C-alpha cells in the first residue's frame, strides 16, 4: 500500500495509507491523549467508536482546506494533511471534554478499585485539572455485584470497550449500550444483574475497562482474616499463568517467570503451605488423558464393528473438549446445550486441587476440612464464580474457599510491604506443590492439549514415553485464535485436534463440530484470547497486548523447558496420590472427587 | 392497471389517463356541469374529519344523480392544513376551507347543482379581510412555485394512473432509454439541486461519488425520518405524491448502479407509510419496479423500513444502523455511506431526502437547464463539494413548513432566494393575533433565529449560514413578542438533550449541562458569568461533537445569544422575563381595576382566586400555577403580570 | 378491557417456546408473533436477519401493547440474537415501551409548532387533572396513560393532542380536559 506524508506540529511523517492521525503521531513520539480508543481489546479487535473526543486534534485536509477538529484515533491520514495536536483550539476542546466527563463522575479515587490504574484519573492528572467548571446532575446506578465481577455504572465513561470485547471477541453478547442520551450506559439486557445474564465471567471486560466501572470482586480481606485466624490452616495454590505475569508489577520484564520469588512472598504473607495448581494440572492430565484414551478406544471398536465415522464419534463422545476453563464451561452451558456430552468430565485443576486438599491432604495432616482454608491465586475471574458453584461444596464445605486474582495478590503484597524483587527464590511445599512442565503449560493456549498428548502417547504405547524434541508439540503452540493439527498419538494412529482461545473462536470451532462431527477428535478451548496468560485477573496490560502476551507465553514455555520432569504421569507426588488414595485414573474415587457434570444454563 | 413493459406502454398509459386531470388542470367556470371535487386526504385534514366529509359528498352526489359528471377525488395535502379540511372544486377554481361533514349537502346542492358559491366556506384573506373567490388569487398560493409539491392537492394520491396522467414515470423512461447512468448524474449535477434534508450537499455530486464506487451491491435510500418537530414537508409529499419518490429512487438507482432501494420512514407517519406502500405495490404490479424495467436491463425494487422514534436516526449513519436493526448511533465519517464499509451492511449506499427525490423526476423530464434557472444559482464549493463560499442563492425551489405565530400556517414552496419577508408577510399573511414579529427560527433544533433586521435576506444555504442560522430541512417557526428567546433556546435544548444518542461525551453530557444553565437562567438563578460560560461551552460542543446532532445542538443558544442578548441580560441581571413566559420570574396580581365579577375565580383551574362578588379578588400566590387563564378571562383587564 | 393493551404475558398455561410458561391468552399472542416472524423467513446463518429486529418489535408491541422482558427474550430466541441486542434497541427508541399502557393513551405533541402554540400548558393541565406525570405510569385505574411526543406532522393544527389514534387539533387545556371527561363518562357507562 502506498505511503502518505503528513505534517504534525510542523514535523513531516510518512505512514502507510489507512493509518490514523494517532498512528502517525505515535511514530513521531507525539503524545495524544485517548480514552475510548483501544487498539486491541483481544484477538486484535480494535475498539474505535471515536466517542470520548479526548483525542481531538486540529487538522486540515479532512473537509477540504478548512481547519477542523478531528478525532486522531479514527481519522485516516490524507495526502497533504496538516495536524496540530497542541493548538489552543485543540487543547481547549480536550480540556472541556474532560471536564464534562468528570462533571458526571463520582470523584472518589481514594477508595476506588482502579486508583492509580485508572486511565481517567491519569488524564485528569496529565491535564492538571484543578476544578471542574461544569456542575450538575450526575448519573447514579446501583452497584451490581456477582461472585466474580462488580459493576459501578456511575463510573462508566461509555468507551464501549467492554461491549466490544464481549460481543465482537467473545461473542457472548452479555453487554449492550442501554438507554440513550445522558443516562445511557453499557449494561446487560434489561439492566439485569450480570449474574442473571449470559455472562461467562471471563473477565475480559474487566481487563479493558479504562476506569473503575467494571472490576473484579475482591476477596483479599477475607483471605487475610483467614490467615490471621489461629484456628485455621491456610494453604494457597498458584495457577500456572500467575508466575509469568505478576513480575511486571514489581519491575520485572513482562513475561519473566518469578516462581520462586512468588512462593517466598506468599510464605512471608503468612500462608501455612504454598502449593501449586500445576500439581492438579498434572492430575487433570491423568484423568483427562485416561478419558480421551477410553473414548478413542471405543471409537476404534465401533468403527471396527462397522459403524460410520460420524456415528462412532457421536457414540464415543468425540471430539473430547477440555474442561479446565470455567469461563468456557459457562459459555458451553449457555450457548451449546446440545454438546454437553462431549467435554471431559474433569473438574478444573483449581477444583481438583481443592477437592484433593480437603480430602487427601486434610486427612494426611489431620485437620478437619472446615478448618483447612484453601485459597487460590488465579489469573481469572471465572474461577471465583466456579469456586462458588454449589456442586463444588460437598456437604456445604467449599473445596476452594477464596479465589484472589493476580492483581489482588499484588495489592496484598504491597499492603504487607513485600516486594517480589527483594525476595530470594523458594520452593513449593510438598506434597501438593510438586509439578511437571506439562502442568505449567496449562497457562497458555495449546498447553492443556500438549500436556495431554504427551501423556496419552505413553498410555497408548505400552508405557513408552516420548523422548527428545518429540515432547514439544509445536503445532499447537502460538497465540493464533484457532489452530488445527493432525498428530500421531501412537504409531499409525493420527488424530485431528483443534486448539482455540477466545470465546468467539470457540464458537467457530463448535460450529465446525456441529457441522461435521468427524472433523476433530480432541479440542482445547480457553475463554481468554491467548489463554490464562490473558486472564481477566491478570495485571492490566498497558502497552501492546499482543507483545505482552507473547512474552508471557515465552515465559511459560521457558518454565516447561527448564523442568526436570515434563510429563504429568511421571510426577512422583501424583503417582503417590494414586497409590495412596485414588487407585487408578478413572476409578470410582477419582470420579467422585475429580469429575463433574454439566447443565444447560439459560440464565437469560 | 395494464402492464407497462416498455416506454411505448407508458406513453399509451399516459395518453389513456391524461383526460382524468383535464378538469383539474383547466380553468373553467362554475357553470361547468362536469366537476372534480378535490378533497384533502392528508394527515391534517384526516384529523379534521375529511374522511366523513368525502363519504357525505359522495352520498349527496349519488342522491343528486350526478355520479357520471362529478367525481370526488381524495388528494394529498394542500399544505394549508390549518384551514382544513380543504375542498377545491375544479374547474371552477373555488377553494373551501374548514369544511365539515355537515357542509357536504350544501356544497352539492348549492354549488354543484346550483352553480353558486357557498360564500361562508370561502377563505378570508387575513390582511385584507376579504373572501377569496378565485383560488389562483390566494396570496398563499400565488407566490409559490410548486415543483416538489406539484402533485400534492392535484392528483388522487392512491392512484398510480393519476400519477402517470401528470407525466409520471416519463423521467425514468427518459433516463433508462435515452441516457447512460453518467448522463443522469451529469443532468442532476447541472441542475444544481442540493440535498433538501439539511446539509445541502449537491445531489449530483453525491450521486457521482456513489456511481464511482465499484461494487456489485449498492443501495439507494430515501431518508423519510423527518425528525424536525414542526416540519411536515416530507410527510405531505409522501401522502400526496408517493410515486414521485418511487420514480426518483429508480432514477437514482439507475444512475449510481443500485439494485435495491430502502425508504426509512418514521413510525409517527402511518398514513405516509401506507400511501408509499401502495405506490410501491402498484408500480411493482405493473412492472415499473422489479425485473427489466421498461424493457431494459435495469432491475430495481424498494422496501420500506420503519423507524421507532429517534430523531438522531435522521442522521445518515445512524439511519443505516437503525435499518440494520441496531441502536441508531451515528458513526464517525469517513467512511461515508457511499464508501465500501460505510453504508447499509457495509455496502456503498446513497442517502437522499424525500423532497430532494420529489424534484428529480421533473428535472429529468424538463432538463437541468430549466431547473437551474429557478432561483438564482451562483455558488462556489470546494473540491469536496462543501459550501466554502456562497455568493448568493441556489437552484430550484425549497418547501418550508411555516408555523408558529403566523396567520397562514402551512407548507409553502418557493424559489430559492425568496426573502423571509415575502414568505412571512405575503404568503404567510403576517403575524397572527396582531402581535409583533420577533424572530423566525429556521432549521429546527439545529438552526438559529433570524431577526427583523435580516428579514430581507434571501433564503438560500449560504445566506442563512452567514447570519447564524441554517436552512435545515425547512422548518420555519415564526415567533412574536410573546415568545421568550431564552425559553425557546431551553425548549430546543430540552429536545436535543432528549434525542442525543448518548454516544459521545460533548453531546451526552454537554447538552445536559447547557440545558441546566438555561434552566437556571429562566428560573432567575443565572448570573452574567453564566452567560459567558454558556456561550463558551456551546462553542466547544459545536466544535467537538461526533455527529450533526451534537454539532448543531448549540445553534439555538448561540443565535439567540447573538441577537437577543438583552433578553438574557434581563433574566440574569434584572430577573425579569420580557416576554412574560418564564413563570418563576413573574407573579400575577389583581389590581384595583377589579370589579369583582368572579369570572377569573370561576376559570382558575386550581382555585387560587378568592373574593366576594363585587369586591376586589385576590390571588393566592402559593396555589397559583401561572397558567394565565385569569388574565385571558378578566373582562376588565384587572390582572397584571409583574 | 381491550386485552391487546393490558394483559401481561404471565400465568401458568403450557409452555410455548420450550422455556417459559404463559397463560393461554398470552400464548395466543406469542403464536401470533411467531406466525409473523415465520413469514420473514429468517436464516440463522445470515447475519442480516438482524435487520428485521425493529420490524418484529413493532409487531410485538402491536400485539402485546408493550415489550416486557419475556417478549424481548422470545424475540431474541426466535431471531437467534443475544437478548442484550434486543434490549439495547428497545431502550434506545422512544416508540418502544417496556411498561403496560393505560386503556386510553393520550399524547400531547411537544413539537416546536405545537409548543409555541402552548401545548405544554395542555400537557401540564392533563397531568394535573389525571394526577399522573407524563411519560410515567398510567392512572391507578388503568384508564389513561399520558405521554408527550414530538410532531405527528399535523403541525398546521397546532397544538395537537392524540387520544389513541385520533388527532385533536387546536386543542386548549379546557378542551383537552373535556375530551378526558367524555371518555371517563363513556367508560363509566360501559
Ligand atoms: C441529527 C440529524 C437529523 C437529521 N434528520 C434528517 C431528517 O429527518 N430527514 C432528512 O432527510 N435528513 C436528515 N438529516 C440529514 C441527513 O443526515 C442527510 O444529510 C440527508 O438525508 C441527505 O439527503 P439530502 O442530501 O437529499 O439532503 C439529519 C441530520 C442530522 C445530523
Ligand atoms: S474510576 Fe478512576 S477517576 Fe473514577 S473514581 Fe475510580 S480511580 Fe477515580
Ligand atoms: S491527592 Fe489530594 S485529595 Fe488525594 S489523598 Fe492526596 S492530598 Fe488528598
Ligand atoms: S465477563 Fe466476559 S462474558 Fe461477562 S460481560 Fe465481561 S466480557 Fe462479557
Ligand atoms: S463499563 Fe468500562 S469499558 Fe464498559 S463502557 Fe463503561 S467505561 Fe467503558
Ligand atoms: S482462560 Fe484461564 S483465565 Fe481465562 S477464563 Fe479460562 S481459566 Fe480463567
Ligand atoms: S453528537 Fe449526540 S447524537 Fe451525535 S453521536 Fe454524539 S451523542 Fe450521539
Ligand atoms: S394564573 Fe392560572 S392558576 Fe394562577 S390565578 Fe390565574 S387562573 Fe389561577
Ligand atoms: S375577572 Fe377581573 S374583574 Fe372579574 S373578579 Fe377577576 S380580576 Fe376582578
Ligand atoms: S480516543 Fe479518540 S475519540 Fe476517544
Ligand atoms: S392535510 Fe389537508 S391541507 Fe394539509
Ligand atoms: S409540532 Fe406538533 S404536530 Fe408537528
Image (tube, coloured by chain):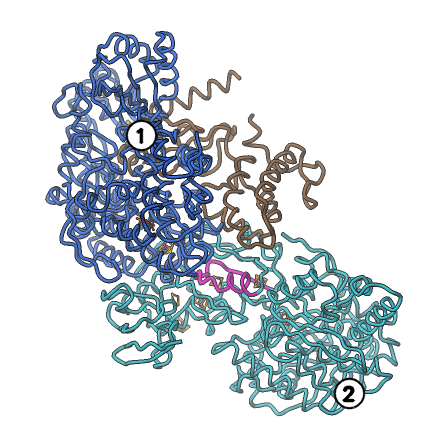
Chain colours: A cyan, B blue, C brown
Rendered image: mark on residue B77: 1
| Residue A457, visible in the rendered structure | yes
Q: Which chain letter goes with mark 1?
A: B
Rendered image: mark on residue A466: 2
Give the side of residue A547 with respect to residue A470, left or right: left
Percent across and percent down for residue A578 are 85, 79
Give whichever of B405, B619 is nearer the camera: B405
> Quick one: label 2, few (<14), some, or many (20+) residues within 10 Å?
some
Taking the image as four quarters, which one is ligand 11 found in?
top left
For residue B557, above or below residue A550: above
Percent across and percent down for residue B306 are 45, 42
Rendered image: mark on residue B303: none
Residue visible at 32% across and 34% down?
B236
Percent across and percent down for residue A196 are 62, 54
Badge 1 and badge 2 both on one subunit:
no
| Residue A84, visible in the rendered structure | no
In terms of image quadrants, where is residue C12? top right
Q: Is mark 1 within 8 Å of ligand 11?
A: yes
For residue A34, above or below residue C146: below
Give the side of residue B51 with respect to residue A542, left or right: left
Extent of the magenta region: A149-169
In terms of image quadrants, where is residue A296? bottom right
Percent across and percent down for residue B486 are 23, 45
What SS does tag 2 mark? loop
> Quick one: label 1, few (<14), some, or many (20+) residues within 10 Å?
many
Q: Is residue A385 magenta?
A: no
Q: Is residue A160 magenta?
A: yes
Disc 1 from disc 2: Cα separation: 86 Å
Amino acid at each position: 500500500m502506498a505511503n502518505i506524508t503528513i505534517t504534525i506540529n510542523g514535523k513531516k511523517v510518512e505512514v502507510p495509507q489507512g493509518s490514523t492521525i494517532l498512528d502517525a503521531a505515535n511514530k513521531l513520539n507525539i503524545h495524544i491523549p485517548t480514552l475510548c480508543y483501544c487498539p486491541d481489546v483481544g484477538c486484535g479487535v480494535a475498539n474505535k467508536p471515536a466517542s470520548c473526543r479526548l483525542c481531538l486534534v486540529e487538522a486540515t485536509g479532512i473537509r477540504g482546506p478548512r481547519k477542523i477538529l478531528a478525532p486522531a484515533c479514527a481519522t485516516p491520514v490524507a495526502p497533504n494533511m496538516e495536524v496540530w495536536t497542541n493548538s489552543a483550539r485543540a487543547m481547549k476542546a480536550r480540556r472541556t471534554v474532560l471536564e464534562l466527563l468528570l462533571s458526571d463522575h463520582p470523584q472518589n479515587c481514594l477508595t476506588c478499585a482502579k486508583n492509580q490504574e485508572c486511565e481517567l484519573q491519569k488524564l485528569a492528572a496529565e491535564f492538571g485539572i484543578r476544578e471542574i467548571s461544569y456542575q450538575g446532575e450526575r448519573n447514579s446506578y446501583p452497584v451490581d455485584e456477582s461472585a466474580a465481577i462488580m459493576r459501578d455504572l456511575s463510573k462508566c465513561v461509555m468507551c464501549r470497550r467492554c461491549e466490544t470485547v464481549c460481543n465482537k471477541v467473545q461473542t457472548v453478547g452479555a453487554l449492550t449500550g442501554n438507554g440513550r442520551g445522558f443516562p445511557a450506559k453499557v449494561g446487560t439486557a434489561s439492566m439485569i444483574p450480570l449474574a442473571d445474564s449470559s455472562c461467562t465471567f471471563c473477565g475480559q471486560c474487566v481487563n479493558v475497562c479504562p476506569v473503575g466501572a467494571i472490576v473484579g470482586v475482591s476477596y483479599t480481606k477475607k483471605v487475610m482474616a483467614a490467615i490471621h485466624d489461629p484456628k485455621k490452616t491456610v494453604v494457597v495454590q498458584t495457577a500456572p499463568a500467575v508466575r509469568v505475569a505478576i513480575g511486571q508489577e514489581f519491575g520485572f520484564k513482562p513475561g519473566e517467570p518469578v516462581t520462586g520469588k512468588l512462593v517466598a512472598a506468599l510464605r512471608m504473607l503468612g500462608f501455612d503451605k504454598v502449593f501449586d495448581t500445576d500439581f492438579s494440572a498434572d492430575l487433570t492430565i491423568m484423568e483427562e488423558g485416561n478419558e480421551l484414551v477410553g473414548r478413542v478406544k471405543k471409537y476404534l471398536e465401533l468403527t471396527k464393528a462397522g459403524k460410520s465415522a460420524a456415528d462412532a464419534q457421536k457414540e464415543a463422545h468425540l471430539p473430547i473438549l477440555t474442561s479446565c476453563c470455567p469461563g468456557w464451561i459457562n459459555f458451553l452451558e449457555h450457548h451449546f446445550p446440545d454438546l454437553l456430552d462431549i467435554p471431559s468430565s474433569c473438574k478444573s485443576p483449581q477444583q481438583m486441587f481443592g477437592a484433593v486438599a480437603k480430602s487427601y491432604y486434610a486427612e494426611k495432616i489431620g485437620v478437619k476440612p472446615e478448618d483447612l482454608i484453601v485459597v487460590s491465586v488465579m489469573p481469572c475471574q471465572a474461577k471465583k464464580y466456579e469456586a462458588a458453584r454449589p456442586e463444588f461444596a460437598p456437604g456445604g464445605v467449599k473445596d476452594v474457599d477464596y479465589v484472589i486474582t493476580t492483581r489482588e495478590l499484588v495489592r496484598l503484597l504491597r499492603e504487607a510491604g513485600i516486594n517480589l524483587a527483594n525476595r530470594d527464590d523458594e520452593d513449593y511445599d510438598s506434597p501438593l506443590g510438586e509439578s511437571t512442565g506439562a502442568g505449567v503449560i496449562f497457562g497458555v493456549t495449546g498447553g492443556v492439549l500438549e500436556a495431554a498428548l504427551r501423556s496419552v502417547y505413553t498410555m497408548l504405547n505400552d508405557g513408552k514415553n516420548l523422548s527428545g524434541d518429540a515432547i514439544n508439540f509445536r503445532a499447537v503452540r502460538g497465540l493464533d485464535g484457532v489452530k488445527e493439527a493432525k498428530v500421531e498419538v501412537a504409531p499409525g494412529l493420527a488424530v485431528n485436534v483443534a486448539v482455540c482461545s477466545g470465546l468467539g473462536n470457540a464458537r467457530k470451532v463448535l460450529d465446525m463440530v456441529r457441522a461435521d462431527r468427524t472433523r476433530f477428535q480432541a479440542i482445547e478451548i480457553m475463554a481468554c484470547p491467548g489463554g490464562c496468560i490473558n486472564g481477566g485477573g491478570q495485571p492490566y496490560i498497558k502497552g501492546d497486548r499482543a507483545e505482552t502476551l507473547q512474552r508471557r507465553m515465552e515465559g511459560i514455555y521457558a518454565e516447561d523447558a527448564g523442568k526436570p520432569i515434563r510429563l504429568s504421569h511421571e510426577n512422583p507426588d501424583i503417582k503417590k496420590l494414586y497409590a495412596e488414595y485414588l487407585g487408578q485414573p478413572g476409578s470410582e474415587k477419582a470420579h467422585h472427587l475429580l469429575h463433574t457434570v454439566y447443565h444447560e444454563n439459560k440464565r437469560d | 392497471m395494464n402492464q407497462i413493459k416498455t416506454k411505448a406502454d407508458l406513453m399509451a398509459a399516459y395518453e389513456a389517463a391524461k383526460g382524468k386531470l383535464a378538469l383539474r388542470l383547466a380553468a373553467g367556470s362554475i357553470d361547468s356541469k362536469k366537476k372534480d371535487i378535490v378533497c384533502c386526504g392528508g394527515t391534517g385534514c384526516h384529523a379534521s374529519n375529511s374522511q366523513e366529509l368525502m363519504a357525505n359528498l359522495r352520498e349527496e352526489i349519488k342522491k343528486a344523480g350526478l355520479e357520471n359528471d362529478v367525481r370526488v377525488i381524495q388528494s394529498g395535502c394542500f399544505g394549508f392544513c390549518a384551514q382544513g379540511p380543504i375542498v377545491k372544486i375544479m374547474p371552477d377554481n373555488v377553494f373551501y376551507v374548514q369544511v365539515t361533514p355537515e357542509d357536504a349537502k350544501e356544497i352539492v346542492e348549492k354549488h354543484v347543482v346550483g352553480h353558486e358559491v357557498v360564500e361562508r366556506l370561502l377563505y378570508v384573506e387575513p390582511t385584507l379581510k376579504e373572501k377569496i373567490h378565485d383560488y389562483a388569487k390566494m396570496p398563499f398560493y400565488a407566490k409559490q412555485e410548486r415543483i416538489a409539491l406539484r402533485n400534492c392537492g392535484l392528483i388522487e394520491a392512491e392512484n398510480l394512473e393519476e400519477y402517470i396522467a401528470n407525466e409520471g414515470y416519463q423521467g425514468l423512461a427518459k433516463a433508462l432509454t435515452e441516457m447512460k447512468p453518467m448522463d443522469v448524474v451529469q443532468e442532476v449535477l447541472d441542475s444544481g439541486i442540493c440535498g433538501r434534508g439539511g446539509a445541502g450537499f449537491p445531489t449530483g455530486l453525491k450521486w457521482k461519488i456513489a456511481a464511482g464506487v465499484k461494487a456489485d451491491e449498492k443501495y439507494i435510500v430515501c431518508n423519510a425520518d423527518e425528525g424536525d418537530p414542526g416540519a411536515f414537508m416530507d410527510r405531505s409529499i409522501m401522502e400526496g405524491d408517493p410515486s414521485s419518490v418511487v420514480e426518483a429512487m429508480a432514477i437514482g438507482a439507475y444512475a449510481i448502479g443500485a439494485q435495491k432501494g430502502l425508504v426509512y420512514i418514521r413510525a409517527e407517519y402511518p398514513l405516509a407509510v401506507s400511501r408509499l406502500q401502495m405506490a410501491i405495490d402498484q408500480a411493482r404490479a405493473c412492472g415499473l419496479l422489479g425485473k427489466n424495467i421498461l424493457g431494459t436491463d435495469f432491475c430495481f425494487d424498494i422496501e420500506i423500513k420503519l423507524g421507532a422514534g429517534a430523531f438522531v436516526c435522521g442522521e445518515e449513519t445512524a439511519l443505516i444502523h437503525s435499518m440494520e436493526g441496531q441502536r441508531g448511533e451515528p458513526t464517525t465519517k469517513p467512511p461515508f455511506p457511499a464508501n465500501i464499509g460505510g453504508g447499509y451492511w457495509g455496502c456503498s449506499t446513497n442517502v437522499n431526502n424525500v423532497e430532494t427525490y420529489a424534484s428529480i423526476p421533473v428535472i429529468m423530464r424538463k432538463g437541468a437547464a430549466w431547473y437551474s434557472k429557478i432561483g438564482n444559482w451562483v455558488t462556489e464549493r470546494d473540491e469536496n463539494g462543501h459550501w466554502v463560499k456562497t455568493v448568493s442563492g441556489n437552484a430550484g425551489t425549497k418547501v418550508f413548513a411555516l408555523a408558529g405565530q403566523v396567520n397562514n400556517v402551512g407548507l409553502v414552496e418557493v424559489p430559492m432566494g425568496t426573502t423571509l419577508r415575502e414568505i412571512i408577510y405575503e404568503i404567510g399573511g403576517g403575524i397572527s393575533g396582531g402581535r409583533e414579529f420577533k424572530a423566525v427560527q429556521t432549521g429546527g433544533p439545529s438552526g438559529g433565529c433570524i431577526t427583523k433586521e435580516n428579514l430581507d435576506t434571501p433564503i438560500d444555504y449560504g445566506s442563512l449560514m452567514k447570519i447564524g442560522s441554517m436552512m435545515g430541512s425547512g422548518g420555519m417557526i415564526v415567533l412574536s413578542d410573546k415568545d421568550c428567546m431564552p425559553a425557546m433556546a431551553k425548549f430546543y435544548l430540552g429536545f436535543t438533550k432528549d434525542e442525543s444518542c448518548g454516544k459521545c461525551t460533548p453531546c451526552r453530557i454537554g447538552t445536559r449541562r447547557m440545558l441546566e444553565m438555561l434552566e437556571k437562567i429562566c428560573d432567575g438563578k443565572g448570573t452574567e458569568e453564566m452567560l459567558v460560560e454558556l456561550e463558551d461551552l456551546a462553542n466547544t460542543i459545536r466544535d467537538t461533537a461526533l455527529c450533526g446532532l451534537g454539532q448543531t445542538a448549540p445553534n439555538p443558544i448561540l443565535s439567540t445569544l447573538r441577537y437577543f442578548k438583552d433578553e438574557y441580560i434581563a433574566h440574569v441581571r434584572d430577573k425579569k422575563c420580557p416576554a412574560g413566559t418564564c413563570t418563576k420570574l413573574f407573579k400575577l396580581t389583581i389590581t384595583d381595576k377589579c370589579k369583582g365579577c368572579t369570572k377569573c375565580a370561576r376559570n382558575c383551574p386550581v382555585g387560587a382566586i378568592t373574593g366576594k362578588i363585587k369586591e376586589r379578588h385576590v390571588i393566592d400566590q402559593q396555589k397559583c400555577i401561572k397558567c394565565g387563564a385569569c388574565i385571558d378571562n378578566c373582562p376588565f383587564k384587572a390582572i397584571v403580570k409583574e | 378491557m381491550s386485552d391487546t393493551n393490558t394483559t401481561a404475558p404471565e400465568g401458568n398455561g403450557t409452555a410455548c417456546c420450550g422455556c417459559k410458561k404463559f397463560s393461554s391468552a398470552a400464548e395466543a399472542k406469542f403464536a401470533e408473533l411467531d406466525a409473523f416472524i415465520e413469514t420473514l423467513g429468517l436464516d440463522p446463518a445470515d447475519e442480516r436477519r438482524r435487520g428485521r429486529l425493529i420490524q418484529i418489535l413493532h409487531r410485538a408491541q402491536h400485539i402485546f401493547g408493550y415489550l416486557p422482558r419475556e417478549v424481548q427474550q422470545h424475540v431474541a430466541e426466535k431471531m437467534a440474537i443475544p437478548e442484550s441486542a434486543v434490549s439495547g434497541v428497545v431502550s434506545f427508541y422512544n416508540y418502544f415501551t417496556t411498561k403496560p399502557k393505560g386503556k386510553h393513551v393520550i399524547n400531547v405533541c411537544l413539537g416546536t409548532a405545537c409548543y409555541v402554540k402552548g401545548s405544554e400548558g395542555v400537557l401540564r393541565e392533563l397531568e394535573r387533572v389525571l394526577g399522573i406525570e407524563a411519560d410515567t405510569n398510567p392512572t391507578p385505574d388503568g384508564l389513561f396513560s399520558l405521554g408527550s411526543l414530538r410532531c405527528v406532522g399535523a403541525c398546521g393544527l397546532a397544538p395537537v393532542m392524540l387520544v389513541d389514534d385520533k388527532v385533536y387539533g387546536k386543542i386548549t387545556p379546557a378542551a383537552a380536559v373535556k375530551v378526558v371527561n367524555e371518555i371517563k363518562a363513556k367508560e363509566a357507562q360501559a
